[in-house]
Image (tube, rainbow, N blue to C red):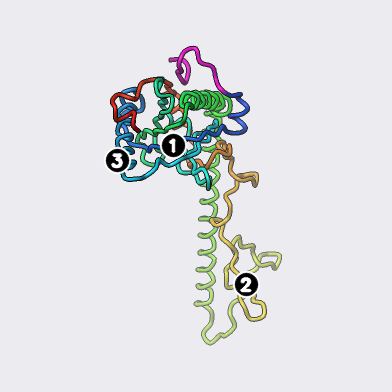
Amino acid sequence: MNRAFSRKKDKTWMHTPEALSKHYIPYNAKFLGSTEVEQPKGTEVVRDAVRKLKFARHIKKSEGQKIPKVELQISIYGVKILEPKTKEVQHNCQLHRISFCADDKTDKRIFTFICKDSESNKHLCYVFDSEKCAEEITLTIGQAFDLAYRKFLESGGKDVETRKQIAGLQKRIQDLETENMELKNKVQDLENQLRITQVSTSPAGSVTPMSPSTDIFDMIPFSPVSPQSSIPTRNGTQPPPVPSRSTEIKRDLFGAEPFDPFNCGAGDFPPDIQSKLDEMQEGFKMGLTLEGTVFCLDPLDSKC
């Protein structure tokens, strides 16, 4: 398949690209739950998951429990599942992790999608009940995936090698800074050992400590790292220690903070740039499949 997604024939997108790129599209639905599935795609896979969750929901309904309501926020950054009143995010599914999306072409209420969990890397099937909006939500997810894939190609896919080089240069700069600090510490240790040797070899009975050696201009040689004991005190108290380089924000050769090519406002990404690029490329390469199928197969389904 040449495109990153496949969709049902004779269907058009529901929203403008600007609405999904700059904002999000909200939908209200009932959340039947999620369950692990073995495959990232397949009608039979989601059909079994729907039947499983419907049966579990039927048991809870007989016990007096209601199906929880949620709000779906769909954009090019993913599908968020929120509690409608508090707006607390319950699940955040990134689009390149969503591989399959289907709605019930007979019921018009049930829809589902399969998403790879970011922590466990397991494939989870999410099932929802939305009054007459199942097909529209499915198409909206497909459109968001299409736009996200195009955005990735424009801002990420074309300059992958450049970003690899930037990441490599930043790593090299950090290694050089660490090596430089280690050399400074070794120089300081050698200076301290030299002072101890000079004091121990001074004439017996002498109470005056040997003054620091001077150069040909009668000046004390420059020390890149001054010993802590040489810092004068003020009002009988020791000045606060100078924070080490490791506690500061890492900066590059030009004094700027490290370049983050994935800082697009969607969320927090892992620090390994190459790992993130590989993950997104793999997800978009797999693509998103949209289907219309039949979930209601027995009388139990129609009662839920």
Query: Which residue range is magenta in the image?
Result: 1-14
* Three-letter amino acid code of the residue under disc 1: Lys
Q: Nearer the viewer, residue 138 or 286?
A: 138
* Residue 157 can be seen, yes or no: no
Residue 22 x %, y %:
62, 32
Q: Quadrant of the N terminus?
A: top left
Q: How far apart are labels 1 and 3 at the CA level? A: 16 Å
Residue 54 x %, y %:
33, 34
The disc at residue 2 is: none
Vertical relation: 237 (above or below) 19: below
**Are dots 2 and 1 in contact, CB under 8 Å?**
no
* Residue 174 can be seen, yes or no: yes
Circle 1 crowding by C-alpha within 10 Å: few under 14, some 14–19, many from 20: some
Q: In this figure, which residue is indicated by the disc labeled 3?
A: 59
User: Is 5 contained in the magenta span?
Assistant: yes
Residue 72 x %, y %:
50, 36
Residue 298, located in which quarter of the rendered image? top left
Q: How far apart are labels 2 and 1 at the CA level? A: 61 Å
